Every structure is written in C-alpha cells, then in structure tokens.
Image (cartoon, rainbow, N blue to C red):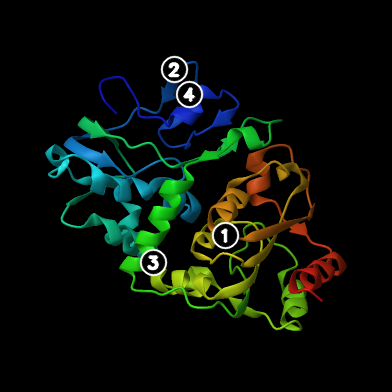
Amino acid sequence: MADNRLAVPPLYTEHAHMQVSDNRFLLRHAAGLAEVLESRTEAVHSGIGVFGAGATNWYHWLIEILPAAFLAESLPKQYLGFPLLVPEHVRSITTFGDALQLFAGDRSVVLLSNETLTRVDNLVFIDPPVRGPMNMQAGYWPSPKDYSQHDVVLRAFRKAMIDRLGLAETKPTRRLFLARSNALRSYNQDDLIAIAADRGFEVVFPETMTFREQVETYLQSEFLIGPSGAAFANTLFCQPGTRALTWILPQYSGFCAYSNLARVVGIDLRYLFVSPTSTIGSTHDAYKASYNLDAGAFGARVDLMLGH
C-alpha cells in the first residue's frame, strides 16, 4: 500500500470477472476502485515484493509468488540492499520457508503481518511468470484465455531449485498416488487407492514431506496420479516423459494451471471428470465441494496410462 493505492496483481484489474478479494483487507474491487477494511498500517522503507493472492496456498506460493525471489537475483546493484517482503506465515510453514531460503541469499527478509496493511515507500514488484485466476464471479469459470506463463523463466526457476538442493535427475521409476489427509474436497479416496495399489502404486502424502523430500519424490516419479490440487504444483519437478493423471469438476474443463506446467516440463497429463455431491454455482463452491470419481473409469484410465 502507498498513499491511497493498493498493490493488486494486474491480472485482476484487467479482468472484471476475476476476483482476488481476500476477505480480510480487500473486500471487493472494480474499475480501478477498491473497498478496503480499515486497519492499522505498518511502514516499510523499501523492499522486493514476494507476496500475492493466495500466498497461503502451496501452488500460488511456489509457482506464482516465489519466482520473484529468484528473479530478484538479477536486479541491478542498486537493489542489493532491498529486503524480501514476505507474508509472515512463511516463517511458520516449514516447506514455504525452506523454499524461500533457496533464493534469500544475503538479503534480509521482512515478514508482513497478517493483521495490518503494509505501507511501502519504495516497492519493487516483479511480474510473476505465471498468471491465472484465483477465484471468479458467480457464473464464470476458468477459460484457457485467462492463463499465461513464461516457459523460459519457469524452466530456469525449476533448474535452480533442483541444483541448489543438490538433486540429480536420474531415471524415474516410481508409481505414485498423491493422497490427502484433510477433508477439503473429500472424495472416494480409499476406493481409488485400492485400485492404484493393485497396479503397483505407492501412496504418498506430500503435505507431510519436507520441501527437499517433495522435490526428490516428484523427480523420481515415472507415473503420477492424484486429485487436482496444490500438490500438483510439484509436477514442475517431474521429468520429461512422466505420465500423470488427475481429475476435476466438469465446470473446470477450461482450467489450465497444471496442464500448462506439464507442457513446460514435458509431462503427459490427462484428466477425468468427477461428479460433485452438491450444487456448484461458483468457484467458491467448487473449492470446498466433495465429489465422487467413477472407480471403473479410473481403473481403465490408469491401465491406459500404464500401457496395458
């Protein structure tokens, strides 16, 4: 924030049907105007923005926000003293913090409070290499035209992380089922795990792994299956030729976030559609919606993926 101006990703000022409101400070916005909850402010003299919409979500943090810290390494010398401005939750979520440390280097890190607005006198904001909607107005659904990305930057970002973690891209051999332990978007997971296990898949819970373990696990995957969600952000670390299968609501047929990542890496990613157990009228409904995936269709598609 500076004076009466708020830092809002350009994507959301250019497309009225997309929503970035966080329900804390930014309540709604349109036509260059915004309604903001009055709050205490903190002052920061200068810094490089490593923040953005959905910063507590692993996909948005890893793919859209963290690249700013990587790109900041190429800024001119006059910005060497600028700290990284990072949401304070990064300190409490180990995987977020570990990923940040790969790029923090000698820069100091200033944690931005979740309870106050921050006024920055000299803010460096680096355009994210990936753009896509977080939420949309009721009646609107993601479309391919809503997405864009810079493939060259993403590949360089990927390589930097793998190299700095000291990992090697050896021949992948593992068959992985990406399981979830939380109830958000619950589905018939146990049924699908049983089918996958019969075909040699091991169950992994990415949320329980360290950042390094996550990167190494995805690097080793030859076949990868699991529900669409933040864990699929890590497909950035898969190797070319990996075959992947995921599933989404029919309303998300134009959703491109993970298929675009698959193209960057060279993954063969396929989709199945699921049946929601409640009425879905908006992306907000979809975020929490439970669903079922037809077990027969799932088994047949896994067999096809394995080449049976």
Q: Name the front one of labels 4 and 2.
A: 4
Disc 1 versus disc 2: distance between alpha carbons?
A: 34 Å
Tell me the residue that label 3 is attached to: 162
Disc 1 versus disc 3: distance between alpha carbons?
A: 17 Å
Q: Check residue 232 in the rendering and tell me which mark sits there, or answer none.
A: 1
Q: Name the front one of labels 2 and 3.
A: 3
Residue at left 54%, top 58%?
Answer: 265
Q: Is there a contact, CB below 8 Å, between mark 2 and mark 3?
A: no
- Residue 229: x, y in percent? 60, 56
The kind of secondary structure element at disc 4 is: helix
Tell me the residue that label 2 is attached to: 33
- Residue 213: x, y in percent? 43, 74
The kind of secondary structure element at disc 3 is: helix
Q: Name the front one of labels 1 and 2.
A: 1
Q: Is there a contact, CB below 8 Å, between mark 1 and mark 3?
A: no
Which image quarter is the C terminus in? bottom right
Specify which label sits upstream in the sequence, 2 or 3. Answer: 2
Q: Is there a contact, CB below 8 Å, between mark 4 and mark 2?
A: no
Residue at left 50%, top 68%?
Answer: 207
The kind of secondary structure element at disc 2 is: strand
Tell me the residue that label 4 is attached to: 13
Disc 4 versus disc 1: distance between alpha carbons?
A: 27 Å
Mark 3 burial class by Cα count in 10 Å: few <14, some 14-19, many 20+: some
Name the image quarter holding residue 135. Answer: top right
